[in-house]
Image (cartoon, rainbow, N blue to C red):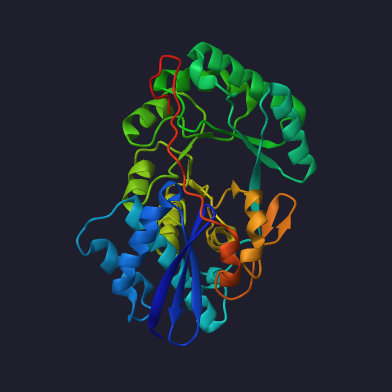
């Protein structure tokens, strides 16, 4: 089965891709470098020059060829290759009438546990949001413990407000609901350490991205300084970065993004490396219903899957696919349809104009860039 054409589609905040074959099977995928879809769109068009005419079944061979040909890689190329890789696995599943999770070794779970985000602009609103999510069936919550405008406040004030927010959520939902913290790379090392120590009484399941991911040394310093389990890796784009992170014993959970870190071909390997170190897989999920479906296939097939985002905002775009993933309380149901379980409806895509991300910046009170 030969690849005839690869077409990327810029849709609202998403970058979708379809890979067409000479046997009429069309694969569906999505790229995950959400802030720079325009660049990745161009990269997909360039990579298609290699893929067109090739055997759609030689997925690993294609990944190795493209990623090693000139040894130039990075987030944009990896996102482009990830989208195509997902689509090729979708084709492989459709060709044999099996879901991708069956090709990866078979289903380990029937449904995918997901978390809900806690929202709110005040402490009281956050507590109410947490209660609402638990009432909806979620057993796991995540919150970013920062109030609007925190960048312009002193570190001591930010830390105090964060502790108050976490305490209020714990009071609202109790200690039998899992609670993780998304720090969004907003703190300096000393701030992250002080905050983590003050949060110890609140049974935090994970402390996610306290620092920007560019350097592992300060992350290592924080991990050695506080007993909160660390989670990071959503901006990593290759297996070598994840291996380094795991080998340094920094994390309890890693956050590979299927649509950025190499598609099924590489993320299955990343999960295996983590499994050998008893590190859990906590996938980073953004994007359309296409990404949700693809991620569920991976999650179903890896033993060390832990959790991922529910991402209900993507449901507003369910009409662009034929069989969106079904929800059941705090779970997503695993599809047994061939491939990733759905197909993109190209006739619906024009309804959602592309929305590129604008660079706005976040600033401290003195005008310096905050994060």
In the image, 244 versus 323, the foreground residue is 323
* Residue 257 visible, this orientation: yes
x, y percent for residue 244: 33, 44
Residue 152 higher or lower than 255, as above or below: above
Horizontal side, residue 332 vs residue 368: left or right: right
Quadrant of the rendered image containing residue 83: bottom left
Horizontal side, residue 27 vs residue 202: left or right: left
Question: Quadrant of the image for the N terminus?
Answer: bottom left
Horizontal side, residue 80 vs residue 143: left or right: left
* Residue 238 visible, this orientation: no
Quadrant of the rendered image containing residue 316: bottom right
Residue 20 higher or lower than 165, as above or below: below
Query: Residue at image x 49%, y 14%?
Result: 155
Query: Residue at image x 72%, y 27%?
Result: 125
Q: Return the residue found at the far left.
A: 70
Residue 338 higher or lower than 273, as above or below: below
Label count reads 0
In the image, 262 versus 220, the foreground residue is 262
Q: Return the residue found at the far bottom.
A: 23
x, y percent for residue 351: 60, 61
x, y percent for residue 325: 66, 62
Q: Return the residue found at the far right.
A: 135
Question: Quadrant of the image for the C terminus?
Answer: top left
x, y percent for residue 332: 67, 57
Residue 143 higher or lower than 95, as above or below: above
């Amino acid at each position: 089965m030969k690849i005839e054409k690869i077409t990327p589609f810029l849709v609202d905040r998403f970058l979708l891709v379809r890979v067409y074959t000479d046997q009429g099977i069309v694969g569906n995928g999505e790229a995950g470098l959400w802030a720079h879809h325009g660049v990745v769109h161009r990269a997909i068009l360039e990579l298609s020059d290699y893929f067109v005419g090739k055997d759609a079944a030689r997925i690993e061979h294609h990944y190795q060829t493209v990623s090693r040909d000139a040894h130039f890689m990075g987030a944009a190329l990896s996102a482009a290759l990830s989208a195509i890789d997902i689509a090729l696995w979708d084709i492989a599943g459709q060709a044999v009438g099996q879901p991708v999770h069956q090709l990866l070794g078979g289903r380990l779970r029937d449904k995918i546990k997901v978390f809900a985000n806690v929202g709110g602009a005040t402490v009281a609103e956050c507590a109410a949001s947490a209660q609402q999510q638990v009432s909806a069936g979620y057993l796991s919550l995540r919150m970013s413990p920062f109030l609007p405008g925190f960048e312009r406040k002193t570190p001591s004030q930010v830390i105090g407000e964060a502790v108050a927010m976490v305490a209020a959520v714990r009071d609202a939902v109790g200690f039998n609901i899992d609670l993780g913290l998304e720090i969004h790379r907003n703190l300096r090392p000393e701030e992250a350490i002080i905050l983590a120590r003050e949060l110890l009484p609140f049974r935090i399941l994970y402390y996610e991205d306290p620092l920007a991911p560019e350097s592992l040394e300060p992350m290592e310093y924080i991990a050695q300084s506080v007993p909160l389990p660390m989670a990071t890796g959503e901006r990593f784009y290759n297996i070598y970065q994840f291996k380094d992170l795991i080998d340094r014993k920094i994390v309890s959970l890693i956050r590979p993004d299927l649509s950025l870190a190499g598609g099924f071909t590489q993320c299955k390997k990343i999960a295996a490396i983590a499994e050998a170190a008893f590190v859990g897989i906590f996938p980073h999920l953004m994007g359309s219903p296409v990404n949700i479906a693809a991620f569920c296939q991976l999650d179903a097939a890896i033993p060390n899957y832990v959790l991922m985002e529910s991402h209900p905002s993507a449901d507003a775009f369910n009409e662009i696919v034929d069989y969106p993933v079904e929800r059941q309380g705090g779970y997503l149901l695993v599809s047994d349809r061939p491939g990733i379980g759905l197909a993109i409806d190209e006739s619906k895509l024009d309804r959602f104009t592309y929305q590129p991300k604008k660079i706005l910046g976040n600033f401290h009170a003195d005008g310096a860039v905050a994060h």
